[in-house]
Image (spheres, rainbow, N blue to C red):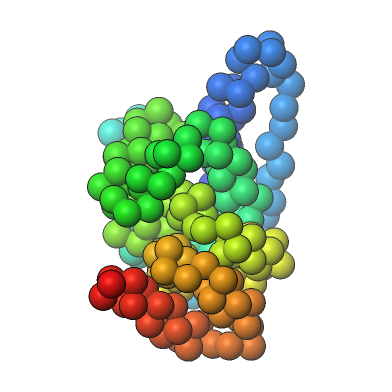
Amino acid sequence: MNKAVLIKGNHRLATILNEEYASSGYEDFRVPVTMYEIDDGDFNKAYTNCLDLKVCETSQERSRVNLEGIPAFVLHIAILNDSVVFVLNYLQKIVSNKEIESMRFHPHKRSVLWNTLVEKGLVVPAGNSKFPMIPLYFLLMRPSTQKISLKKLEDDDFPTTHRLFVTACNASLANDEAVASIISKYPPMSAVKLDESLQKLTNRRMLK
């Protein structure tokens, strides 16, 4: 093997940890590194669309990889379960309940918060896929939906295709218990069927 793709560095997690530990003076922490061997086709497509490490270090283009060109399978690895939970826990500490409720119905406010975190170097830009914002959408979910979604994420069963995390969040505002019940059926329910079921609940909320 003479090529590799660094899909998630530890500097953002380290930045968050530094903020949390600044007051206590505790700085002895470690971030584990995991290596994956994937299909050549997925790897080559991801490799072609990534920036060279030297470019990332010296150019203003750093962290500006076009996520649309990265295979969904690789993105799924990049948004590791523990990273989602890690950022979610951080958001729960810095975002008030009032702000959460406001962001649930005002997408612009979600973007403002996320861009603020991007400027601090804590997260990556959302892009069109909104994939990096999964922790924020988990934060905005109603309790029952959030609980089952975290359980599915822990079991590596939470669907990320079709931006289902966005649809699940929006649908939970219409009927939290119904959404939780629907998500609990995936799998064996297909992602397409799940999306259709959640969209129906979302549309009902919009029609009210």
For the point 63% across and 83% down, the residue is: 185
- As drawn, is 123 to the left or to the right of 110? right
Vertical placement of 158 versus 55: above or below? below
Residue at 47% in and 35% down: 96
Identify the image quadrant of the N terminus.
Answer: bottom right
Where, quadrant-wise, is the C terminus in this rendering? bottom left
In this view, 184 is above or below 28: below
Q: Nearer the viewer, residue 54 or 192?
A: 192
Q: How many marks?
A: 0
Q: Measuring from the top left, give residue 167's x and y in whole percent.
A: 41, 69
Q: Nearer the viewer, residue 163 or 13?
A: 163
Q: Nearer the viewer, residue 19 or 141?
A: 141
Percent position (x, y) of residue 92? 55, 39
Q: Is residue 91 above or below residue 47?
A: above
Instruction: Give me the residue at 74% from left, 21% from top.
Output: 28
| Residue drawn where x is 48% and y is 40% of the image | 97
Give the left or right position of residue 114, taking residue 179 as reference.
Answer: left
The x and y percentages for residue 10 are: 58, 37
Instruction: Report whether residue 123 is seen.
Output: no
Q: Quadrant of residue 205?
A: bottom left
Q: Quadrant of residue 188?
A: bottom right
- Look at the image and tell me whether residue 161 can be seen: yes
Instruction: Locate residue 102, reporting x and y percent.
Output: 35, 45
Rendered image quadrant of residue 90 = top right
